[in-house]
Image (spheres, helix red, strand yellow):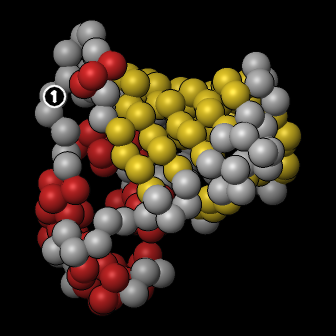
Amino acid sequence: MEDRLAARLAELRAERGWSLDELADRSGISRSTLSRVERGEISPTASLLGKLCTVYERPMSRLLTEVEAEGAQVVRASAQSVWTDEDSGFVRRSVSPPHPALRAEVVEATLRPGADIRYDAPSVPGLEQHLWLLDGSLELTVDGEAHVLEPGDCLRFRLWGPTRFVCSGPAPARYLLVLVVP
């Protein structure tokens, strides 16, 4: 999957006719890092992938689905793709991946204690999200408003600005995220 992701990122840039320098200017990511990501020499972090998704105007889940095989109606646990960002302590399972005929998807995510992930802008402005915290505690800041969630809490919102996810407790934070493309 890492190789397919690298190839897809290079393809997205080429589709727009952008040079690495232009993509670096648009994303705020260094040209050398972009080059290494597109060649598959390094795996992108969640933050880096978030910046690229913003530039390419697509949710991260859509990008990851584009490098996976077409899904069936039943998505078996063994077939659900898992992506891990060791640097940030973020693990993402695509429970119900995007499908061309459907607008929603379901993601299970886990953040290790102390994890702090920031996204400067939404990949898709107005993206509807429903976050249901299953385990641990999570501090989620959406458009400057902080929310402290405990197990069973659900936060519903649309993305228009920056977000920040912080696992504030001693145990990992595990949550389900339902994304609905506008």
Q: Residue at x 61, y 46 (%)?
A: 111
From the viewer's perspective, is 65 left or right of 48?
A: left
Q: Residue at x 20, y 49 (%)?
A: 1
Q: Residue at x 22, y 43 (%)?
A: 66
Q: What secondary structure is marked by label 1?
A: loop
Residue 154 image position (x, y, % from top left): 73, 24
What residue is shown with label 1?
A: 70
Q: Is residue 152 visible?
A: yes
Asked if 3 appears above or below 170 in the picture, the reply is below
**Where on the picture, by quarter, is residue 163?**
bottom right
Q: Amino acid at mark 1?
A: Glu
From the viewer's perspective, is 69 left or right of 75?
A: left
Residue 58 image position (x, y, % from top left): 38, 50
Asked if 58 appears above or below 129 in the picture, the reply is below
Along the line of sight, the residue nearer the viewer: 86 or 144: 86
Asked if 13 appears above or below 139 in the picture, the reply is below
